[in-house]
């Protein structure tokens, strides 16, 4: 480019300067002035040869051009007529345009202008040189320089220019001095025009179709370029933000208190919140406090128990432990009231009940299991004594004689010392047993007691009812299973509602009834009765037999009981009268009624019943006939203590009496079919087994006897002697198991299990009947 | 009230019962027949266990609730009756 040319020229110039012999420019202090000075100078002095000396030695184009331009400078084109048709330059600068540009005025674009300067200004030939071709990369095409050179040469030819090669600044000044006054006053027109756009870099883009062969190369180059752009430093921002100056500002606030809270939520938590929001507040509010006081009673061990499920943090725990001592005092006071509150609550009582039964269940488990005919659970961890093992094996192996095994005893301190007078199972709940305590012998009339025992708790009765006088009989109602009728020694009958929790038993008493019994009520029975002969519906009625010789029906009237006499047990005189003596004393002075001691209703025909009297007679009566006995069975000569129909075989009943005998009767035989005696003691109670027709149990003063008519008619098959100084009083068979309950005069009810009774599966009715038939035929 | 007291006494004197602890709703034992350190241990540990057990039962069915917990160990049987406001813990040694 020209700049390089200029640089070369400059260098050359300097060298030229040093060679005085050269015709080139002598002094050029600074290489500012361009190339053109040289040729001008030389051209003014010399001819064309000077131009040749302006050799830049490089074979530059300029040089050659200048060389070629040489002849033209002197040339004047003359036509035939000697007209000067020298071609004028295309551009004629204004002669008056003096350019007062300083030497420093390097406006590169004004090459043409500088040319004009040369043309116009006579003295100011340096002006054009002010244009510096040096410096930054500039100009133009070579053509401009060429034309410029031409112009410069032409101007040189026209003028006489003093050889004036001033210094940069100095020369300027001298140039300026040559400006005449008139030139300064001239109006100079300055034309400013826009130059062409100079494109510094023009790389036209070209579009290549994707299908061409070198498309991949181009694409790859594009990608590379994009990557270069991307990797350029500072290019990671999509926009440039300026980093302003930083200013620090201080603010002071109160310290922030941080509190950790946590909670766990579970399914039931959500359910609780959904169901009962108002309850929830009371429930949840004590809970956070529970965390804090796990062991505040005597503050012994702090510690690991703190890990509660409600997410307590260590801070809460430590706070609690520090506060614990303070709160110990408070807590002791609280705990007292807590205890009271808890104890009073029903839930606590229920819990106690269940707990007690659980404990007792553990204790009595083997026996209860035997009772219920379940296998007894063996404790796997307890040390097994070798003796017990052998004994168990023995028991298992012995299929020998029937025996009675004692299971447990219902007894408590309340009942100690009282005599059991009667027992009854609850009709609905077979685990519930009512026991009446009272003396048969009216020696000391302690107030009576009724205890309702549950099998689940043999150590304490479920209900305790204190009665006014000694209890002599009991029965549970079938229709209202919670009603218990109690007959007492003073002849009154009371009906208790056993189910009620509070102490106020719903009592209906017959004590105000005018027709109440005058003697101890010996037996009570709830029976279903037909109301009328034709009607089918059955109503449960309470029957009683008492020592005043009356059998009565009781019903509730005006919150009291009233009775209707069903039968009066009249004395039956002996057929034989004492001959002679007191014919008019046919009626005895004694009352005409004999005390009734027991009765029993026929299992199927409930209007038929048997009554045993103090005389020893057994009367068969009917509910419809209140005047006469249907039949009388005479055998006993002592009070008949108990009569019992056989539940499995109709028309057969047993009776026991104080004359040491037990008699087996058939209904239409006026004489007993069989009689049993074992010991010379009064037999107090007799009961049939509910399962086997040939088995019955009898209790006399000293022992419990189990008779099995199938195996022996003469002796009981199993005998259980009573404990010393205790008399057995009453007997009850358990309904669904092979157990027998015996009540004694010490207030204890003992449960025995019948074992190894070699009775068959069937109910043995036919065997009984055979026996009876064979016996009766004798 | 006397009834409750009697029942509690009966339980405490039953055969095989080693000890009884009544714990109130805050986990403080309010009545006990054991010595202090044992009581405190039982109260604290069973409080946790019952909370966990109850949570399990209720998670399965929120309408259900735990009423009784029985733990059979090698040496004893520990029975815990649960309510909202209290715990009744009885330790019984099985008797043969």
Image (cartoon, helix red, strand yellow):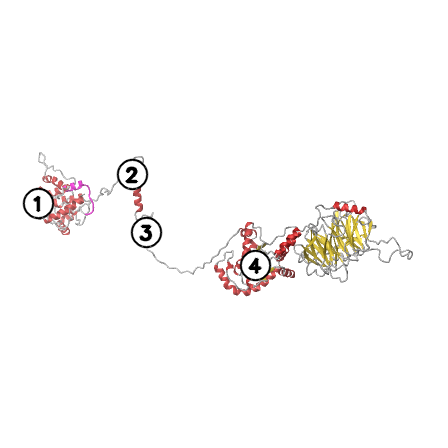
Q: How many marks?
A: 4
- Please state the chain letter of the residue tagged with numbered disc 4 in the rendered image: B
Q: In this figure, which residue is indicated by the disc labeled 3?
A: A242
Image coordinates of residue A614 in percent, x first then y, are 81, 55
Q: In this figure, which residue is indicated by the disc labeled 4?
A: B25
Q: Dot 4: few (<14), some (14–19), or many (≥20) neighbours within 10 Å? A: some
Q: Is residue A610 magenta?
A: no
User: Which badge, 1 or 3, comes first in the chain's sequence?
Assistant: 1
The CA distance from mark 4 to mark 1 is: 129 Å
Q: Dot 3: few (<14), some (14–19), or many (≥20) neighbours within 10 Å? A: few
- Please state the chain letter of the residue tagged with numbered disc 1 in the rendered image: A
Residue A525 in the figure: left or right of residue A8: right
Labelled disc at residue A261: none
The segment highlighted magenta reads A135-149
Q: Nearer the viewer, mark 3 or mark 4?
A: 4
Looking at the picture, tell me which residue is in the foreground, A365 or A44: A365
The CA distance from mark 1 to mark 3 is: 63 Å
Q: In this figure, which residue is indicated by the disc labeled 2?
A: A217
Q: Is residue A141 magenta?
A: yes
Image coordinates of residue A332 in percent, x first then y, are 56, 64
Extreme residue in the top direction: A80
Image coordinates of residue A487 in percent, x first then y, are 75, 56
Q: Dot 2: few (<14), some (14–19), or many (≥20) neighbours within 10 Å? A: few
The CA distance from mark 2 to mark 1 is: 61 Å
Labels 1 and 3 share a subunit: yes
- Please state the chain letter of the residue tagged with numbered disc 2 in the rendered image: A
Q: In this figure, which residue is indicated by the disc labeled 1?
A: A45
> SS of the residue at dot 2?
helix
Q: Nearer the viewer, mark 3 or mark 2?
A: 2
User: Which badge, 2 or 1, comes first in the chain's sequence?
Assistant: 1
> SS of the residue at dot 1?
helix
User: Could you tell me if residue A187 is visible in this image?
Assistant: no
């Amino acid at each position: 480019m020209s700049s390089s040319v200029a640089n070369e020229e400059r260098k050359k110039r300097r060298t030229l300067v040093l060679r005085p012999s050269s015709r080139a420019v002598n002094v050029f202090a600074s290489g500012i002035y361009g190339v053109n000075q040289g040729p001008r100078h030389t051209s003014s002095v010399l001819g064309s040869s000077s131009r040749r000396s302006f050799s830049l030695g490089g074979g530059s184009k300029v040089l050659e051009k200048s060389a070629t331009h040489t002849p033209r400078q002197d040339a004047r084109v003359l036509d035939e007529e000697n007209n000067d048709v020298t071609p004028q330059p295309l551009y004629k600068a204004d002669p008056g345009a003096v350019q007062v540009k300083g030497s420093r005025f390097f406006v590169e674009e004004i090459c043409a202008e500088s040319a004009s300067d040369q043309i116009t200004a006579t003295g100011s030939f340096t002006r054009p040189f002010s244009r510096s071709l040096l410096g930054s990369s500039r100009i133009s095409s070579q053509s401009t320089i060429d034309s410029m050179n031409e112009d410069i040469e032409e101007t040189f030819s026209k003028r006489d220019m003093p050889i004036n090669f001033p210094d940069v600044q100095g020369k300027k000044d001298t140039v300026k001095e040559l400006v005449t006054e008139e030139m300064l006053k001239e109006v100079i027109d300055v034309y400013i025009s826009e130059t062409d756009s100079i494109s510094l870099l023009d790389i036209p883009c070209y579009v290549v179709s994707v299908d061409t062969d070198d498309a991949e190369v181009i694409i790859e180059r594009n990608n590379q370029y994009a990557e270069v752009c991307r990797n350029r430093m500072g290019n990671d921002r999509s926009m440039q933000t300026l980093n302003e100056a930083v200013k620090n500002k201080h603010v002071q606030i109160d310290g922030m208190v941080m509190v950790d809270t946590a909670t766990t939520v579970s399914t039931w938590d959500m359910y609780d919140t959904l169901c009962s929001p108002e309850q929830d507040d009371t429930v949840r509010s004590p809970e956070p406090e529970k965390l804090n006081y796990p062991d505040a009673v005597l503050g012994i061990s702090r510690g690991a128990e703190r890990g509660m499920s409600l997410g307590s943090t260590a801070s809460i725990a430590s706070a609690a432990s520090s506060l614990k001592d303070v709160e110990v005092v408070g807590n002791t006071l609280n705990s007292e009231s807590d205890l009271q509150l808890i104890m009073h609550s029903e839930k606590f009582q229920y819990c106690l009940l269940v707990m007690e039964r659980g404990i007792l269940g553990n204790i009595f488990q083997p026996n209860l299991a035997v009772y219920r005919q379940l296998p007894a659970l063996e404790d796997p961890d307890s040390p097994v004594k070798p003796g017990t093992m052998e004994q168990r094996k023995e028991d298992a192996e012995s299929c020998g004689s029937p025996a009675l095994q004692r299971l447990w005893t219902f007894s408590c301190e309340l009942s100690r010392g009282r005599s059991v007078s009667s027992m009854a199972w609850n009709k609905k709940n077979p685990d519930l047993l009512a026991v009446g305590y009272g003396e048969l012998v009216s020696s000391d009339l302690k107030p009576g007691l009724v205890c309702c025992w549950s099998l689940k708790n043999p150590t304490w009765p479920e209900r305790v009812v204190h009665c006014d006088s000694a209890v002599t009989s009991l029965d549970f109602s079938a229709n209202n299973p919670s009603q218990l009728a109690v007959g007492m020694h003073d002849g009154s009958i009371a009906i208790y509602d056993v189910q009620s929790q509070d102490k106020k038993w719903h009592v209906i008493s017959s004590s105000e009834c005018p027709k109440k019994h005058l003697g101890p009520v010996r037996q009570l029975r709830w029976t279903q009765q037909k109301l009328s002969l034709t009607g089918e519906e059955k109503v449960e009625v309470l029957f009683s037999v008492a020592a005043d010789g009356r059998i009565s029906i009781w019903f509730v009237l005006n919150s009291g009981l009233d009775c209707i006499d069903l039968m009066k047990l009249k004395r039956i005189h002996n057929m034989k009268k004492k001959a002679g003596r007191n014919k008019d004393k046919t009626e005895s002075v004694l009352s005409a009624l004999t005390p009734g001691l027991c009765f029993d209703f026929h299992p199927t025909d409930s209007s038929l019943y048997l009554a045993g009297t103090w005389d020893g007679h057994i009367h068969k009566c009917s509910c419809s006939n209140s005047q006469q006995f249907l039949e009388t069975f005479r055998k006993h000569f002592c009070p008949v203590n108990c009569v019992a129909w056989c539940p499995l075989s109709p028309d057969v009943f047993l009776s026991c009496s104080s004359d040491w005998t037990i008699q087996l009767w058939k209904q239409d035989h006026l004489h007993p079919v069989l009689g049993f005696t074992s010991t010379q003691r009064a037999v107090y109670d007799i009961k049939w087994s509910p399962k086997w027709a040939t088995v019955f149990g009898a209790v006399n003063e000293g022992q419990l006897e189990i008779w099995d008519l199938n195996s022996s008619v003469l002796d009981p098959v199993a005998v259980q002697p009573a404990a010393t100084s205790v008399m057995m009083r009453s007997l009850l068979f358990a309904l669904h198991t092979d157990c027998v309950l015996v009540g004694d005069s010490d207030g204890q009810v003992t449960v025995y299990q019948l074992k190894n009774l070699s009775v068959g599966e069937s109910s043995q009715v036919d065997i009984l009947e055979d026996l009876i038939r064979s016996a009766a035929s004798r | 009230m006397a009834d409750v007291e009697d029942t509690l006494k009966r339980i405490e004197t039953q055969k095989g019962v080693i000890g009884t602890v009544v714990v109130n709703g805050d986990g403080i034992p309010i009545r006990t027949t054991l010595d202090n350190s044992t009581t405190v241990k039982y109260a604290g540990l069973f409080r946790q266990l019952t909370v966990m057990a109850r949570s399990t039962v209720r998670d399965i069915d929120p309408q259900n609730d735990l009423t009784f917990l029985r733990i059979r160990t090698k040496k004893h049987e520990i029975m815990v009756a649960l309510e909202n406001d209290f715990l009744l813990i009885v330790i019984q040694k099985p008797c043969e």
